[in-house]
Image (cartoon, rainbow, N blue to C red):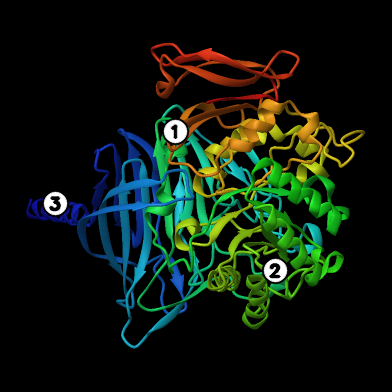
């Protein structure tokens, strides 16, 4: 009897102790909830939204060269707080942002009595968490070798993921560069070819319960970038650090940090529909500028000969034609691409820049990032890879009047590579230069962190439309994915809006474009990047309907607001963006058949609007339509077609 009473009392004490270790943090609107706990020596968390499980118990933790925080940890304490932050930003999907979250600091220690804080911030529809490491006795630094952080999805989940490219593969061994396609509604646990995992961002549909978007932000020179592992059959995806084979096998796979130090933020966006996914600003809410801009940077549109006219166009006369095209369109910039150094040279480039400036056009120049980590032959080379070379080159660029650089072939996510990204950006700011990265990793909060960063590729972009029939066939399908996945977490320099019928200089014979003109106009709005290199060619001024050219002259590249309207990734996408008081609603159809949709457009309720759309023969037209007083409008999109309403 006494034993039974004692056992019962002990059970109550153990249950109470277990409950004391549990911590719950909820969003300000009480809809999103995160539970954090320690079970059997492992920290874990679970996520629910509107009472439905979005993530089951998922592991937290990491291992360092100084101690293990993946197993054998004990709960220490918890502390609650709030975060309120307002900021403005000129180059993302919104210009004015109010961020409010509830904060939980959950402290644990390992077997060596080393402490770490696991910090969660939960706002309406967004979760962010990271690890904060204090000084441990006499240790002022450590190497984080791996993370056991994971995401355990319910069984009914389907995936929208893009495989990490193999290290030292692709063109001139420049991969990985985040240029694999996404598969829509894939199964949980599908392995990648080389078990290299999947890139951020990753989208997951939790059956009929909702959606989850995973990514990370705040990655600087102080850490490596991470990605997702192949999933297990029971739905667990874990954080992976870069493959040691990246960058020709040179450099680390983990992260060396000073103490106290922090990891990047892992982000989880949750919604019962896709609206929170499209509209999230969480990549920027968690970070702040790392330095002041040396001058105001001007966003805008650019011409670009290379995308259609290719390498042969990198000569003085053809660049004059594209400067004239930019001037005719009222574009702010021209981008002159690879081999300008050999085919034009610095002295004649100065003449070209003066000519461009006389036409009120400024210049971006292409550079190879390479020093030692790939085989890309294009020049200029060995100008961006060291501080001494960069500063010498950038001094000339500033004196010549160049306004920005497109730096290419940076494949890899190692901490050393993140340091190169940051060094290029920081040095460029000293010389008043904007930076676009190509053949690059996903930007992780960089639009806010680095004031002169104006975009990155990190997607199967327009150049692959030139090189691959398969990519041309999948163009509309891919476009229907980007607003929900890649482009929702970072600017995306796609280089599109191609109006040639054939994607070659002659505009005939091969590389036939398989999407409509209305589709191409729509992507100018659908794809968000503050400096847009559009793929128009000089002949488009006369062989394309004037209303299409007028649209491309006036479409903005910066936005004050972005709204989800309708869509399903891999099928079709419709979003709205506002520039000052002007709304643009853009849609594309990635399916093999036409689709009719009824959409709600409260910003146009009862108003007459201009609609760019396609008829059944896929000929693009412009007409005036009236939106119902209740904001409803029926729209038909052809296969491979699209529309814009303004």
To which residue does mark 3 refer? 12
Q: Is residue 14 left or right of residue 496?
A: left
Residue at position x 41%, y 37% from top?
276
Whether residue 113 can be seen here: yes
Q: Disc 2 or 3, which lies upstream in sequence?
A: 3
Residue at position x 68%, y 50% from top?
179
- Tell me where residue 637 appears, x and y as whole percent: 63, 19
Residue at position x 74%, y 67% from top?
350
Q: Is residue 318 left or right of residue 521?
A: right
Label 2 to label 1: alpha-carbon separation = 36 Å
Q: Disc 3 or 1, which lies upstream in sequence?
A: 3
Q: Residue furthest right?
A: 509
Label 3 to label 1: alpha-carbon separation = 51 Å
Q: Indicate which disc residue 37 carries.
A: none
To which residue does mark 1 refer? 563
To which residue does mark 2 refer? 369
- Tell me where residue 570 appears, x and y as whole percent: 61, 31
């Amino acid at each position: 009897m006494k034993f039974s009473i004692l056992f019962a009392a002990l059970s109550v004490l153990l249950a109470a102790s277990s409950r004391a270790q549990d911590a719950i943090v909820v969003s300000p609107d009480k809809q999103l909830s995160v539970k954090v706990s320690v079970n059997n020596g492992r920290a874990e968390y679970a996520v629910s939204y509107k009472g439905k499980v979005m993530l089951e118990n998922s592991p937290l933790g990491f291992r360092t060269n100084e101690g293990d925080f993946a197993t054998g940890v004990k709960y220490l304490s918890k502390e609650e707080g709030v975060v309120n932050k307002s900021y403005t930003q000129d180059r993302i999907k919104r210009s004015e942002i109010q961020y409010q979250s509830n904060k939980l600091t959950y402290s644990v220690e390992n077997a060596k009595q080393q402490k770490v804080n696991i910090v969660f911030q939960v706002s309406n529809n967004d979760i962010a968490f990271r690890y904060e490491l204090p000084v441990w006795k006499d240790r002022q630094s450590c190497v984080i070798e791996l993370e056991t952080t994971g995401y355990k999805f319910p069984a009914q989940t389907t995936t929208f993921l893009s495989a990490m490219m193999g290290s030292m593969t692709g063109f001139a061994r420049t991969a990985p560069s985040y240029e694999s396609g996404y598969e829509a509604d894939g199964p949980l646990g599908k392995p990648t070819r080389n078990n290299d995992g999947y890139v951020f961002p990753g989208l997951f549909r939790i059956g009929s319960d909702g959606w989850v978007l995973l990514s990370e932000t705040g990655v600087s020179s102080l850490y490596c970038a991470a990605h997702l592992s192949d999933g297990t059959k029971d739905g667990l995806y874990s954080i992976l650090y870069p493959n040691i084979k990246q960058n020709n096998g040179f450099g680390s796979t983990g992260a060396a940090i000073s103490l106290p130090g922090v990891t990047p933020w892992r982000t989880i966006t949750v919604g019962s529909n896709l609206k929170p996914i499209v509209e999230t600003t969480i990549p920027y809410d968690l970070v702040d500028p790392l330095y002041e801009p040396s001058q105001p940077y001007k966003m805008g549109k650019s011409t670009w000969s290379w995308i259609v006219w290719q390498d042969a166009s990198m000569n003085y006369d053809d660049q004059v034609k594209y400067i004239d095209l930019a001037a005719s369109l009222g574009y702010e910039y021209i981008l002159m691409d690879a081999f300008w150094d050999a085919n034009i040279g610095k002295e004649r480039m100065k003449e070209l820049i003066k000519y461009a400036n006389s036409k009120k056009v400024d210049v971006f120049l292409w550079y190879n990032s390479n020093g030692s980590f790939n085989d890309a032959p294009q020049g200029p080379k060995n100008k961006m890879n060291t501080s001494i070379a960069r500063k010498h080159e950038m001094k000339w660029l500033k004196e010549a009047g160049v306004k920005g650089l497109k730096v290419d072939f940076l494949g890899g996510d190692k901490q050393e590579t993140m340091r190169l990204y940051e060094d290029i950006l920081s040095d460029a700011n000293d010389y008043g230069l904007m930076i676009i990265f190509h053949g690059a990793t996903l930007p992780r909060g960089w639009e806010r962190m680095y004031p002169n960063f104006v975009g990155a590729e990190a997607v199967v972009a327009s150049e692959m439309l030139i090189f691959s029939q398969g990519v041309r066939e999948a163009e509309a399908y891919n476009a229907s994915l980007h607003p929900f996945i890649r482009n929702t977490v970072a600017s995306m320099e796609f280089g599109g809006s191609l109006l040639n019928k054939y994607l070659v200089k002659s505009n005939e014979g091969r590389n036939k474009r398989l999407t409509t003109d209305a589709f191409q106009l729509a992507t100018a709005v659908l794809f968000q990047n503050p400096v847009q290199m559009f793929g128009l060619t000089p002949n488009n001024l006369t062989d394309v309907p004037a209303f299409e050219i007028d649209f491309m002259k006036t479409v903005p590249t910066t936005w004050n607001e972005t709204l989800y309207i309708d869509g399903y990734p891999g099928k079709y996408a419709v979003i709205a963006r506002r520039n000052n008081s002007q709304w643009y609603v853009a849609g594309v159809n990635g399916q093999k058949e036409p689709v009719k949709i009824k959409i709600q457009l409260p910003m146009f309720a009862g108003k007459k609007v201009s609609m760019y759309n396609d008829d059944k023969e896929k000929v693009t037209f412009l007409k005036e339509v009236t939106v119902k007083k209740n904001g409803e409008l029926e729209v038909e999109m052809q296969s491979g077609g699209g529309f814009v309403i303004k």
